[in-house]
Image (cartoon, grey):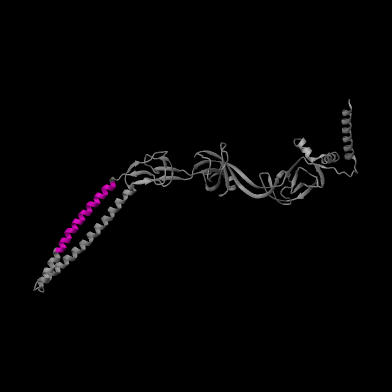
Amino acid sequence: MNWKKWTITLLICLFVAINLFLILKKDTKIARSSYIKEWTTVVKQDITQTKNSQGVVAPAEIGFSYYDNANGPFKQFMVKEGDQVDIGTPLFEYSPDNIDQAISLIEAEITKLENDLDGLETNIDNLEDLHSSLLAEEDNEEKHLLNAISSVEAQIFEKESQKAKLEAEIEKNEELLSSNETMFDTLTVSSNISGVVKEINHALQNPLITIASNEIHVEGIAGENEVLKIAEGMKVRVYTESMRKPIEGMISTISSLPLEKPTVKTETEYGFTVQLAEMETQILQGTHVNLTIVTQEIEDALTVPSRALHKSSLYVLRDNGEVEKQDVQLGNLLNNTQEITSGVEEGNIIAIAAKRANNKAYFTPVKIQKLNKSALSKMGKKESAKYVAKGILSR
């Protein structure tokens, strides 16, 4: 064995002997140090509590068009299933046959009434002429002339009354004619939403046409216990495995009525909807998606991992090389992250699993990956020697 091997062996023995001496000697002034295997840092961050669920992409609105027999017989559909429609797009139309027939009858009645009115007006003119001639007679005060004048005046009054009735009847029929002519404008039924024609009932049963809107939302289901944990306005992240990033949204409605008739043996379920923000990614109706519902959110909270807590205390690694037990005020615990409301500051280094280490010096494991020639050269020989000596004598 050469002198290098003897030297290494001697140094190892010396190191072991010194440490055994320090460990076994009761009255030594060198306190035993705490070994801190793991530590963390107090950080300021937004913390959230979430709940996972599933949903399906569905149209945000369903529009229906109805057939009304009172508007006339059905003529034809003007769209087919799968067609894209906008507000105002013609969907179907009624036949004008009944309206044409009604208009013809009304026009004939108006013509008859107008002819009757013409004849009546001629009769009135003749009576008025007769009345004037009777009044012009020299002996018009004779009894028989007075009776004739009274009779003519009575006839004129009666004819004027008949004329007024005929004029009222003509006006009524003209209004009815105008109403029927207006019905031509309602023969075509148009869409009141933009979307895709989902279904057409060719048997003329209502709803006649069903339209799914272009706008979409997500429909989800929550059990009777889970529905109590969500509320309208909660943020939601919507995603699938193929998405590069989630779509943001929020819960817009929660149904207070069960989806199905409740039974004793099965859990009652309730529906809810998620309104989606503007999307960069196209997503098709009918796509099944995953939902992350943010049930609670705290902004700019001081936090540590919950496993670093010892009841309501933390072990802080101070700059002077000692461990100090620090009582703290606890806030919310969300997803294994503990909010700290007071007692520590952002950036404090916290020991994990450092029981009974209060007011002791500490040392940590050597991180071999950080020991390189560059790091050692930056430290300097004097500082390197100090840390080596400290490491030998620390325990």
x and y percent of residue 56 in the render?
52, 40
Residue 270, percent from left and from top: 54, 45
Q: Which residue is depicted at the point 62% across and 44% down?
A: 50
Q: Quadrant of the N terminus?
A: top right
Which of the 4 quarters of the picture holds residue 63?
A: top left
The overriding secondary structure of the stretch rendered in magenta is helix
Percent position (x, y) of residue 166?
22, 59
**67 lies left or right of 131:** right
Q: Is residue 260 magenta?
A: no
Is residue 21 shown to the viewer in this render? yes
User: Which residue is nearer to you in this view: 209 or 40?
Assistant: 40
- Residue 121 lies in the magenta stretch: yes
Residue 67, image quadrant: top left
Q: Front-most of 297 and 231?
A: 297
The residue lying at 28 percent from left, 55 percent from top is 175
Q: Is residue 148 left or right of residue 16?
A: left
Q: Which residues are magenta?
A: 98-125
Question: What residue appears at the point 18 percent right and 58 percent down from the top-left corner?
Answer: 118
Where residue 194 sits in the image (x, y, percent)?
A: 43, 45
The quadrant of the picture occupied by the C terminus is top right
Query: Does the image show residue 225?
Result: no
